[in-house]
Image: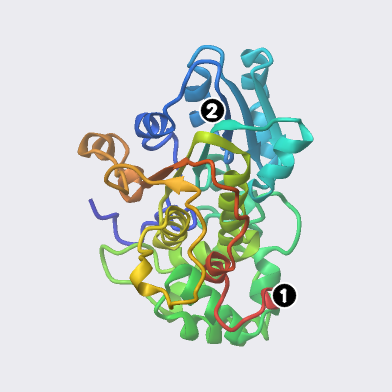
Amino acid sequence: MMPDSGAEIDLAAGGPVRHVPVLRDEVMNALCVRESGLYLDATFGAGGYTQALLAKPGTRVLALDRDPAAVAAGAPLVREAQGRLVLVKERFGRLEEAARERALLDFDGVVFDLGVSSMQIGDPARGFSFKADGPLDMRMEREGKTAAEIVNMAEEAVLAGIFFHYGEERAARRIARAIVQDRAKAPITSTRSLAALVARVAPGKPGEIHPATRVFQALRIAVNDELGELVRALGASESILREGGRLAAVSFHSLEDRIIKRFFALRSGRGETASRRLPHEPPPPEPTFTVKGKQPVTPSRQEIAANPRARSAKLRYGVRTKAPARGTDERLMALARLPGIAKEAC
């Protein structure tokens, strides 16, 4: 169902805000959750997947979230779990360090849910949404550059690159040009002022999402280096999973899904054939994952009807082999960067 004219769809690196965990049963099946297993929820949020993991008797969970508000809100669940849950403020790109610092190794499963949390979107002071006016912030962990600093300081070409590559915004250059012109008169510091600027220079059509939606998505990705964190986290997961352990990732946007799909293709050897290699070219490394079944897994019509925000969700998963971990892959990291623009420019 299309949103009302001018409505905002809340995006999480493209995906929606979730009040309930999307594809919960499918994720638990993909992880093949077993009693007394050790699992890592890399994106705790409101704790939906963690609760599902803890429902299996004897399981232990290490959960991460970079947002201190999410960690604080999860304190009651930590107490309820009675020692079976450790909840840590940490970026999921550092999940291997978080696990090793707590002497936790050989995980049975790792799960990623890449949507932004409802707590973040619902708080105007965080600046993730333009439904209510607030400071143009968007920092998940309240550290580093704000969205306002990028909007008011980045060069026009950098802004256009952010909007086009991270938001897939077709009017990226026009919007960037208008921002540079407007900020010369007065800084752009609020969510509503930026949304109004975008609507003025690139108005949407009736029945479409609010014209500022993709710009806000793109800025949030840039502020939090979300795609870079995803690449680092995928490689780190490979290092902490035992043989037979499973990695499951739910994404909501083509940018995320492309990285996850490419990761599993590279790690499983899909598309590799001996005939494509030169005579003296070394053979490819042994696959670190096997990919099973038809993927991606998508929500059922029943789930979408009950939770329309689930409609863009995609689940991909793999099973760890005994091959040595390969770490972060530069080919994947290239997908996370703005083409031709150094990260420092943001």
Q: Residue 115 placed where, x, y %?
A: 48, 47
Which part of the image, by quadrant, shows the C terminus?
Answer: bottom right
Identity of the amino acid at label 2? Thr
Residue 223, placed above or below residue 3: below
Q: Is residue 225 visible?
A: yes
Q: Residues within 10 Å of mark 2 (few under 14, many from 20)?
A: many
Please tell me which residue is depicted at 55% across the width and 22% down the height of the picture: 37
Identity of the amino acid at label 1? Glu
Front residue of this view, candidates 89 and 194: 89
Residue 35, placed above or below residue 87: above
Can you tell which mark lies on residue 50? Answer: 2
Front residue of this view, candidates 192 and 253: 253
Q: Residue 56 placed where, x, y %?
A: 48, 16
Q: Residue furthest right?
A: 101
Q: Element under label 2?
A: helix
In-image side of 152 versus 304 (left or right): right
Please tell me which residue is depicted at 54% across the width and 46% down the height of the picture: 323
Determine the image quadrant of residue 299.
Answer: top left
1 or 2: tag closer to the N-terminus: 2
Q: Residue 140 placed where, x, y %?
A: 65, 50
Please tell me which residue is depicted at 69% across the width and 15% down the height of the picture: 83
Q: Which residue is mark 1?
A: 344
Q: Residue furthest front?
A: 279
Q: Is residue 66 visible?
A: no
Front residue of this view, candidates 316 and 324: 324
Q: Residues within 10 Å of mark 1 (few under 14, many from 20)?
A: few
Q: Element under label 1?
A: helix
Q: Residue 73 placed where, x, y %?
A: 64, 30
